[in-house]
Amino acid sequence: MEYLQHLSFWDWLAFGTILLILEVFGAGGYLLWIGLAAAAVGLLTYLLPDLPWAWQFFAFALLSLLTAVFWWRRQRSAAKPSDVPGLNRRGSEFLGRTFVLHEAIVGGRGKIKAGDTLWLVTGPELPAGREVRVTGQDGVLLKVEAAG
């Protein structure tokens, strides 16, 4: 308790530096703002050396909260819809489209050729050359039904 009553601006700057170093290891931006809040309290303590430790901690908590809310709002406003929504969902672009069976569906499994790729499909027993419509997706398996 004695140490807390005699915090100097160096203590706050050291704490802020430690938080900023930890941020380098991947805290996702959160420790950056907490570290900057600690550095700001260090600057405040430098300007007001007789500031009681309770007020220092109150200022740190308030600045940490404000910077965290600022960061959260900034991240939310910067998020924009992707111009390529199906980028990480391969196969979803085939939903509702029709293709010709490359290999017959036997035992519930067959193949279609979409572009230059063969896709595994699951559906009712159908012969090769039959048109099918993609109705769903289960991982790398496309669910199909007879078209027409």
Image: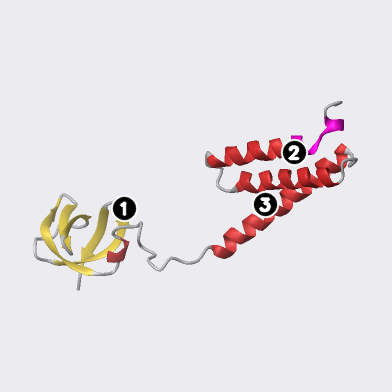
Tag 3's secondary structure? helix
Residue type highlighted by circle 1: Asp
- The residue carrying mark 1 is 138
Q: Is residue 9 magenta?
A: yes
Q: Residue at x 77, y 46 (%)?
A: 43
Disc assigned to residue 68: 3
Q: In what quadrant of the picture does the N terminus appear?
A: top right
Residue 44 pos. (x, y %): 81, 47
Q: Find residue 28 and name its label.
A: none
Give residue 114's position: percent from left, percent from top: 19, 63
Quick one: 32 or 139, which is closer to the camera? 32
Of all residues shown, which one is farthest toward the top? 2
Relative image position of residue 27 (x, y in whole percent):
56, 43
Sequence-wise, which precedes: disc 2 or disc 3? Answer: 2
How far apart are the two marked residues, 2 and 1, measured between alpha carbons?
A: 53 Å
Residue 12, disc = 2
Identify the residue at image location x=86%, y=26%.
Answer: 2
Out of 145 and 93, give the one closest to the viewer. Answer: 93
- Magenta residues span 4-12
